[in-house]
Amino acid sequence: MRDLQDKVVLVTGGAVGIGAAVVRSAVAHGAQVAIIDRMAAAAAALAAEVGNARAYAADVADFAAMEEVCARIVADFGRLDGAVNNAGVGGEFAPVAACTLDNWNAVIAVNLTGVFYSMKAELAHMLPAGRGAIVNMASMAGLLAEANLPAYVASKHGVVGLTKSAAVDHGRDGIRCNAVCPAFVRSPLTEPLFANPDFVAMMNARQPMGRTVTAEEVAETTVFLLSDRAGGMTGSVHLLDGGIGAT
């Protein structure tokens, strides 16, 4: 089933990891995809690999850049039907008392302010069209606290709240906004962690499913939320954590 047939979707942080999985899934489901990433070469390589996609270089923490890139996407594709705000950083591991100001500011700038900037730039084109579906990539840490990641946890809790605010504010404008909250997912960015057998054993032990959720599973849920099959869903928050939140 091609859930996104002929829809135009942008993905921030789309060059690698979960973002790249979302790009591949969206293209497989019929979408034309705009890949936005600071890693321009990686984004271009992925666009060439999947076809029916274009790469754009932009930093989500720069509002002017996001305004410009969204305008370029609409000019290139003719419209914007959906957006996945996935770009994010993890930051340093340290408890609240040792969290540096630089780390706090850097994480919040990308993970929370960057999502706000992206949504404002996207809504500028979706609102006049009277339609649009936005999926914000939060995290299990958007609902539960992870030790020694105060900036990350705060930023992802903020993304969940921002998602609900957009759903309430713009539901009557034809805009749906939902959030996805994965646990740690194996990707090129997290491979150093997953290369440690003790880390893998710990993660598997935490999850009632006994395994880590895959980037592809996160992507399929994201594509569903973008699609018309999720037409009655907005302001919802979806855990993909192997059941950790239920324990």
Image (cartoon, rainbow, N blue to C red):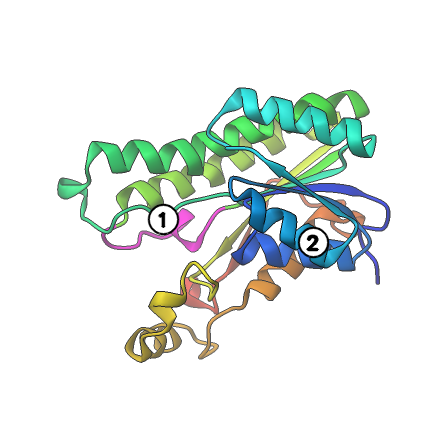
Q: Is residue 41 left or right of residue 203?
A: right
Q: Check disc 1 and report its element: helix, strand or loop.
A: loop
Q: Amino acid at mark 2?
A: Val
- Residue underneath mark 2: 223
Quote the CA–CA distance across marks 1 and 2: 24 Å
* Residue labelled with disc 1: 90
Magenta: main secondary structure equals loop
Q: Position of residue 206 (x, y in %)?
A: 36, 72
Residue in the image at 52% along x and 57% along y:
17
Residue at 36% over, 53% down: 144
State the image coordinates of residue 224 (x, y, percent, origin top left): 71, 55
Pick the front one: 115 or 65: 65
Q: Is residue 200 left or right of residue 227?
A: left
For the point 69% across and 51% down, which residue is it?
Answer: 47
- Is 99 rendered above or below residue 224? above
| Circle 2 crowding by C-alpha within 10 Å: few under 14, some 14–19, many from 20 | many
**Residue 80: image location, x then y, percent:** 76, 33
Magenta residue span? 138-148
Determine the image quadrant of residue 9.
top right
